[in-house]
Image (spheres, helix red, strand yellow):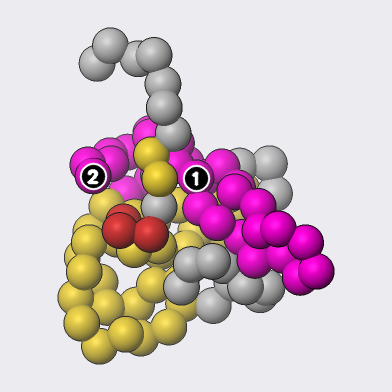
Amino acid sequence: MKVKFGDYVLIEQKRYGVDNEMYRHKVIATLQSNIYVDVPVQSPATEIDHGKMVDVANCICCGVMGTAVRKYRIADITKEATDDKH
């Protein structure tokens, strides 16, 4: 999957006692890193050193904390469907 700056993605958040929930995030950068948050995201979201470089997206969670930027492995996220023709 290809994501870029400005894309919206869905990332699974762990909820205890009920079904997990998908939270909307905005991509602000893509890069390679060995440090990222595991999905489903637990509370508090913690970036962990996985030792191997992978494609990640720097994201902010929409409507929750617009100042916290966290890295998520691109393989773990879902690009939000849009009707954008770009």
Outermost residue, right side? 17
| Side of 65 where 12 appears, left or right | left
Helix, strand or loop at mark 1: strand
Observer able to see residue 65: no
Residue 43, image x and y in percent? 68, 73
Q: Which mark is residue 41?
A: none
- Between 21 and 42, the one lying in front of the other is 21
Observer able to see residue 46: yes
Q: Mark 1 — residue?
A: 10
Q: How far apart are marks 2 and 1 (CA)?
A: 13 Å
Q: What residue type is labelled 2?
A: Met
For marks 2 and 1 on the same chain, the one whose residue lies earlier in the sequence = 2
Q: How crowded is mark 1: few (under 14 residues within 10 Å), some or many (20 or more)?
A: some
**14 in magenta:** yes
Q: In which quarter of the image is residue 7?
A: top left
Image vertical order of residue 64 relative to residue 71, above or below? above
Q: Mark 2 — residue?
A: 1
Image point (51%, 53%), residue name:
11
Q: What stretch is highlighted in magenta?
A: 1-29
Q: In which quarter of the image is residue 42?
A: bottom right
> In what quadrant of the picture does the N terminus appear?
top left
**19 in magenta:** yes
Image point (50%, 45%), residue name:
10
> In what quadrant of the picture does the C terminus appear?
top left
Q: Residues within 10 Å of mark 2 (few under 14, many from 20)?
A: few
Image point (45%, 52%), residue name:
59
Residue 2, image x and y in percent? 22, 42
Image point (55%, 56%), residue name:
12
Residue 24, image x and y in percent? 56, 42
